[in-house]
């Protein structure tokens, strides 16, 4: 890969050069003092009149555009930061409880600039997630909350209901005058202090705040730029991802590295009309290279509901599509490729990727000029911890999408989780990580931090070790994810916490869920959960499948679909399904990033809260 010639040749004087972020051996090594705030200040000084962030506000009118330049953003950060400093000291937590928009971006950066620890959360009107918001607030105990005039009443009402929380000062971002910036007191930000708390999605356990340092943020942004080949400075972002999500934050972070810009919209704007996302990508594609990121369901939803009307001039020829946040679905990639190939979408556009909040975000992705590829593995062998290739048409074939190669200056080993011993390629085990992009730990959870971030690697492979070059005396991060290496590329099988274990055999839930989705047209694609619950007699476990109904099937008799699902799971997996339930759309719990919450769904099922068919 060209380590920066294209990026640097077009760089206005004074901006960060990618070669400045690499040491003599090509490893990522940030220049001293590099933080998000120092990067923004570089941009203000050198490309101040250039657009930094653009927000498409569909709540007011179709296509209402708000923009802020780097210089204007700098003025707002000083003003908001000065107001924050009136109520919060260094290292105090400042939560952002604001709607999606430029005010959110400014509030996040301003809290960091003020020397505080930013806590990116969400306004309380996000349906179904009040408990998660309360958990994060009680955990982080912010001394101040940043919001907007539009959300102020809802925020204050919510805070009134959190009795155990010392009342934080509410600061209304869009009511802070620019003149307040005259009172800002500059703060020296050490690269190893905490920039923000990134709360985990809560898909498999209660959300925890990962301590992300300035070094981790900068390292991961450089890793992303190198891995996905975002070296051309005429690369911009388009994102509807929530800004409290790690992937959403990265989409506003990477333009700060080299003075580009990102176009943002709200998650609701995308869900209601996915064509908006496609049109924004098309507009970006005409400016230069454009990168976006989303989980499986978003690409499937856009393929179903985001097709441009006849005569619409849509150009996707310069688009890069990161797909991740869960095991990547080849069906999502295939359906999107088929739907948008007529609009110039390259076969190499998709970048299946693997990342987690504990590592700031990105861990691995495929090469910038590669197409998404699939390995077909034997289902039974995979459940037994071995990746054995079979033909695509084999009855027991399971499709696994390659997440490519691990990012530069990051080490990912596959280990036996019980012993920490490194496993050979082709064996399925837990992913352990070491690198400067890994977070510092969980906020005020020392025991969990020691267990998750303090793992010690056991025996390494004598040959072909993926720990080669890692620091022998440094701890490793346990990811909780199962994966394998095949031909040097990483294949992520799923999370340990989600595994379905019945009669001593292990099954991956997404495999069962795909079978259920294919069994009947009454099932809403991508909205199925499978999990094990204790058997009625207390001995062993039984399998439960919960599915949402497809559009237009609310009055249909569910019995044929239930029978079809039961038969398909029995035929393909050799499993008896003890209970199948078909529920209305939206009934399965979701995380704040839109992923299905299997653990939450299982808990609701066991408590009797989940609706009957």
Image: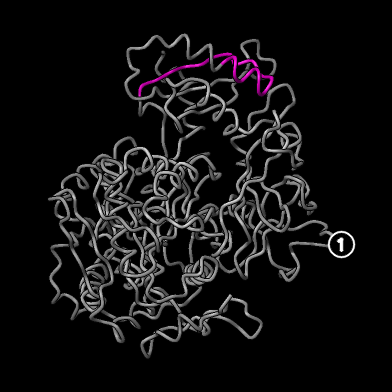
- x and y percent of residue 485 in the render? 71, 53
Say whether residue 327 is left or right of residue 396: left
Instruction: Tell me which corner region of the image, top left, top right, bottom left or bottom right, holds residue 543.
Output: top right
Which percent across, then down, holds residue 487? 73, 56
User: Against 153, is 197 above or below?
Assistant: below
Q: Secondary structure at mark 1?
A: loop
- From the image, tell me which residue sits under label 1: 462
Q: Quadrant of residue 36?
A: bottom left
Colour scheme used in the picture? one colour
Residue at the right extreme of this rendering: 462
Answer few, some or many: residues within 10 Å of disc 1's Cα (few below 14, many 20 plus, some between 14 and 19).
few
**Residue 177 among magenta residues:** no
Work out which quarter of the rendered image holds the C terminus and state it.
top left
Q: Is residue 456 visible?
A: yes
Magenta range is 566-584
Quadrant of the rendering where the N terminus is positioned: bottom right
Q: As displayed, is residue 454 above or below residue 556?
A: below
Task: Give the residue displayed 27% in from the left and 59% down from the top.
Answer: 104
Q: Position of residue 116 (x, y in %)?
A: 36, 67
User: In the rendered image, which quarter is residue 149 located in?
Assistant: bottom left
């Amino acid at each position: 890969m060209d380590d920066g010639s294209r990026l640097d040749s077009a760089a206005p004087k004074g901006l960060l050069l990618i070669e400045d972020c690499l040491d003599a051996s090509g490893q990522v090594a940030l220049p001293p003092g590099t933080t998000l705030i120092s990067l923004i200040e570089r941009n203000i000084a050198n490309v101040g009149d250039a657009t930094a962030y653009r927000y498409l506000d569909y709540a007011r009118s179709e296509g209402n555009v708000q923009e802020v330049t780097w210089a204007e953003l700098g003025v707002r950060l000083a003003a908001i930061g000065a107001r924050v400093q009136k109520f919060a000291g260094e290292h105090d937590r400042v939560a952002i409880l604001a709607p999606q928009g430029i005010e959110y971006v400014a509030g996040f950066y301003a809290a960091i600039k003020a020397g505080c620890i930013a806590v990116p959360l969400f306004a309380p009107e996000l349906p179904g997630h009040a408990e998660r918001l309360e958990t994060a607030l009680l955990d982080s105990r912010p001394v101040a909350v940043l919001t907007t005039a539009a959300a102020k009443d809802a925020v204050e009402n919510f805070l009134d209901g959190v009795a155990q929380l010392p009342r934080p000062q509410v600061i209304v971002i869009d009511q802070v005058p620019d003149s307040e910036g005259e009172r800002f007191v500059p703060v020296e930000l050490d690269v190893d202090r905490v920039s923000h708390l990134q709360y985990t999605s809560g898909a498999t356990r209660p959300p925890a705040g990962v301590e992300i340092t300035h070094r981790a943020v900068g390292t991961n942004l450089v890793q992303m730029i190198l891995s996905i080949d975002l070296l051309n400075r005429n690369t911009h972002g388009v994102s509807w991802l929530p800004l409290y999500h790690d992937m959403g934050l990265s989409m506003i972070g990477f333009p700060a590295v080299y003075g580009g810009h990102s176009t943002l919209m709200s998650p609701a704007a995308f869900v209601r009309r996915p064509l908006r996302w496609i049109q924004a990508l098309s507009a970006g594609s005409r400016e230069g290279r454009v990168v976006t990121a989303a989980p499986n369901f978003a690409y499937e939803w856009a393929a179903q509901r985001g097709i441009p009307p006849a005569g619409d001039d849509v150009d996707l020829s310069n688009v890069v599509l990161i797909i991740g946040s869960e095991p990547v679905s080849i069906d999502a990639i295939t359906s999107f490729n088929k739907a948008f190939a007529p609009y110039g979408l390259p076969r190499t556009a998709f970048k299946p990727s693997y990342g987690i909040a504990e590592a700031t975000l990105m861990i691995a992705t495929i090469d910038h000029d590669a197409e998404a590829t699939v390995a077909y593995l034997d289902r039974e062998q995979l459940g037994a911890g071995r990746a054995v290739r079979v033909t695509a048409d084999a009855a027991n074939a399971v499709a696994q999408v390659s997440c490519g190669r691990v990012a530069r200056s990051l080490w990912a080993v596959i280990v036996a989780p019980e012993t920490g011993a490194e496993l050979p390629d082709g064996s399925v085990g837990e992913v352990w990580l070491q690198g400067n992009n890994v977070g510092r730990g969980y906020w005020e959870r020392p025991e969990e931090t020691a267990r998750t971030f303090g793992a010690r690697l056991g025996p390494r492979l004598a040959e072909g070790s993926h720990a080669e070059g890692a620091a022998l005396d440094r701890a490793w991060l346990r990811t909780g994810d199962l994966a394998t290496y095949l031909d040097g590329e990483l294949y992520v099988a799923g999370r340990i916490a989600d595994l379905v274990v019945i009669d001593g055999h292990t099954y991956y839930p997404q495999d069962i869920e795909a079978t259920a989705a294919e069994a009947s047209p009454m099932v809403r694609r991508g909205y199925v959960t499978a999990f094990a619950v204790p058997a009625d007699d207390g001995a062993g476990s039984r399998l439960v499948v919960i599915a949402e109904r497809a559009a237009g099937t609310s009055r249909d008799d569910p019995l044929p679909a239930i029978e079809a699902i039961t038969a398909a799971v029995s035929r393909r997996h050799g499993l008896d399904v003890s209970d199948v339930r078909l529920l209305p759309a939206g009934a399965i719990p979701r995380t704040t990033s839109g992923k299905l919450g299997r653990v939450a769904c299982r808990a609701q099922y066991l408590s009797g809260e989940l609706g009957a068919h």
